Image: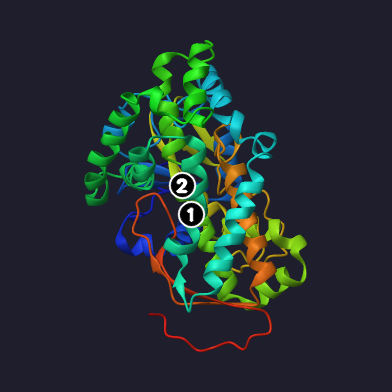
Amino acid sequence: MTAESASLLVDLFSDQSIQDPYPSYREIRDRAPAVWLPEHRVWALARFHDVRAGLRADEILVSGRGVSLNPLVNDQPRHNTLMSDGELHRKLRSTLMKPMMPRGLVEVRPRIDAIADALVDELLEKESFDGIADFSRHLPLAVVSHLVGLPEEGRERMLEWATATFNALGPMNERAQAAVPTMLGMFQYAASLDRSRLRPNGWAARIFAAADAGAIDVEDIPGLIIDYIGPSLDTTILGTGHLLYLLGAHPEQYEKVRKDPGLISAAVAEALRHGSPVKTFTRFALTHYEADAVSIPAGDRVLMLYGAANRDERRYANPERFDVTRDARDHVAFGYGVHRCAGGHLAQLEMESLLRAVVARVGHIEVSEPRALMSNMLHGYEYFRVSFHPPNQPTRCRSSQ
């Protein structure tokens, strides 16, 4: 099958698609195993099996030529885990992952649980609150900024830098153009970071120590600092926002989790599957690649559509339905294979801790209609109102404010 016979005129980065990408995802899944998108001059993989297979084929569909849809970002230095392959990727990832593996997070969990408990107690006292700014952002900002251990000005800008990075990775539309200066500012900050101002034993300080020990090269330091800054916040924040909104919008599902807290982990996985905070990254085809019956030529770029794969009816029955009893542990919201999100374990831990704090204290969740986040590469909400009701308290009617 050729590009002409497996093509589709769709703009995945238009305002309409950003607000509701799922009709376009279905079109792509239904057209072919791999679909040529002339609007972006890129192939798209959207079926669950094909996305997983493509992510496993990391020696053919590589990240070392960049993961963006524009050459400006793809041509930046690639001493980071997101845009590296082979031995370099393994070396960098080994250093990056050490404090974020389950064993390394054991000592962090009590702090995460304490912050989650205090947050829910505080929000129960409010008439209503912002589900993103007041709930979803609180724990990742408090935990990650502390763990990375940057100076104050760096901690204050982490969210701004992370948001800009995901916009700059898209096609060079207005969102990307506006984000590039901020992203380049992040690069400059990481390259000029004074290690004497870092929190001792923080994640950033450990990167300098790894260079001292010869585990990585000195020129790798800024890229690994960026790996902690860029992907570590927005994905967890948006995933948490999806989880909170979905439980409020589906009270029968929330009640199942309240009655059986053993479903907390499954509910988090299902929210990540259903919402998929990161929409896509690209890969570069070093050589010819076969996606079932479709032939992708060497030198072309390939979009891995995580959100589309996670809604593929070929893998999940009734994929549009949010079901906390579903086994969605194989979702690709955090990617798959050697490039699976390094912070996935921490994100899962944070989301489970928040949900555990909620189900222990909150009898009913009310949510307003959400406002979509307008982002090139992220999918989630910018804002929605929430009210927490203690158990056995009658639901009060409130405006969304």
Q: Is residue 18 left or right of residue 109?
A: left
The quarter of the image holding the C terminus is bottom left
Residue 143 position (above or below residue 192): below
Judging depth in this view, the residue of 332 and 371 nearest the camera is 371
Residue that appears at 69% across and 40% down: 106
- Numbered disc 1: secondary structure: helix
Q: Is residue 304 left or right of residue 177?
A: right
Judging depth in this view, the residue of 363 and 380 nearest the camera is 363
Please name the residue that numbered disc 2 is placed on.
Answer: 233
Name which quarter of the figure residue 225 lies in. Answer: top left
Judging depth in this view, the residue of 2 and 260 nearest the camera is 260
| Mark 1–mark 2 CB contact (< 8 Å) | yes
Residue that appears at 27% across and 34% down: 184
Q: What amino acid type should be assigned to the residue bearing mark 1?
A: Ile
Q: Is residue 38 left or right of residue 2?
A: left
Q: Is residue 37 left or right of residue 266?
A: left
Q: Position of residue 359 (x, y in %)?
A: 67, 68
Q: Position of residue 179 (x, y in %)?
A: 26, 45
Please say whether residue 288 is visible from this viewpoint: no
Q: Position of residue 190 (x, y in %)?
A: 35, 29
Circle 2 Cα neighbour tier, 10 Å, few/some/many (<14 / 14–19 / ≥20) = many
Please say whether residue 116 is visible from this viewpoint: yes
Snapshot colouring: rainbow
Please name the residue that numbered disc 1 is placed on.
Answer: 237
Residue 313 position (above or below residue 86): below
Q: Position of residue 188 (x, y in %)?
A: 28, 29
Spatial separation of the CA atoms under disc 1 and disc 2? 6 Å
Circle 1 Cα neighbour tier, 10 Å, few/some/many (<14 / 14–19 / ≥20) = many
